[in-house]
Amino acid sequence: MFRFRFVFTLLFALFYGAFPVGAAEPVRVGAYPFLPFVDKSSGLTFELVQAMNAFQKDYQFEVVSTSANRRYQDMASGAFSVMLFENIKWGWETEPVDASKVFLRGDGEVYVARSEPGRGQAYFQTLNDKHILGVLGYHYGFADFEADQVLLRKKFKITFSPDNEVSLRNLLIGHGDVAVLTKSYLSGYLLKNPQDKDKLLVSERMDQAYAHMALVKKGSKPTAQEIDALLGRMEAAGVLKKLWAKYGLGE
């Protein structure tokens, strides 16, 4: 009897020591290079995840890396179950995901060219005769949100880069006519590099206005509704407003 009680007690301790009662459930959040939301191991996505962890104790959110092209496959395979700062129309329409409500507006993408004498906003009226600089895996309004590089190359003269930073760099050295850049990224770049402001012509019209959502793999936890509720409480507490302001975002 003593031996039985000892074995039972040991197994009980091992089991509940490995799975503490009330422990937060780990949740992996996919993130690909998308300034200012993701820049290697920093950016707004990382700060939002930290704030979400601090605001509740049911889930422990953790950022894992993916790429713009690979994110659909990685979500389907279970590499992660949540993505932030996404939109269902960015290639997710046929994927097994649920979308949260829109939680951030006010950013988007603009067309940027080199500033030259006599060049004005009319330069952006058509892109069909321009060498376009875009980011691989991104969905653009001018292309009806098609991201297949083979199809895009058939329709446009377009060069793909890994991120906005490389697109802008190529534009400045003359390796393209028009770069499609995230407004918040461009604003941040010009704050750090004011000497380049007069070198650039920025379109008044936008390629697209972002309507950021969270996407959640169907059947996983937390659900899209739980994320809606969490972000709603964070907004009511003023947490989100402070985060958006830090990056110059929000309506």
Image (tube, grey):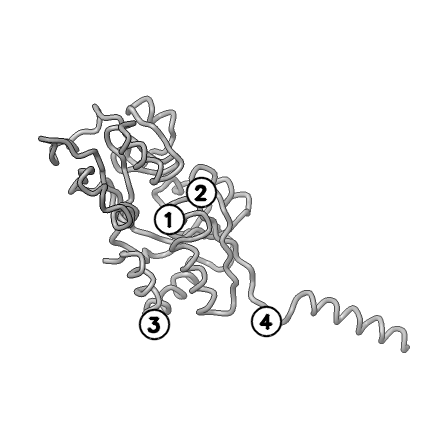
At label 2, the amino acid type is Glu
Q: Secondary structure at mark 2?
A: loop
Q: Is residue 73 left or right of 128 when viewed as pictured?
A: right
Q: Name the residue beneath numbered marker 2.
A: 95
Q: Name the residue beneath numbered marker 1.
A: 86
Marks 4 and 1, how far apart at CA: 30 Å
Q: Name the residue beneath numbered marker 3.
A: 237
Q: Secondary structure at mark 1?
A: strand
Quarter of the figure that contains the C terminus: bottom left
| The quadrant where residue 195 appears | top left
Residue 190 image point, x, y percent? 25, 47
Marks 2 and 4, how far apart at CA: 32 Å
Rendered position, 12 above or below 222: below
Q: Name the residue beneath numbered marker 4.
A: 22
Q: Of all residues shown, which one is farthest toward the top? A: 154
Q: Earlier in the sequence, mark 3 or mark 1?
A: 1
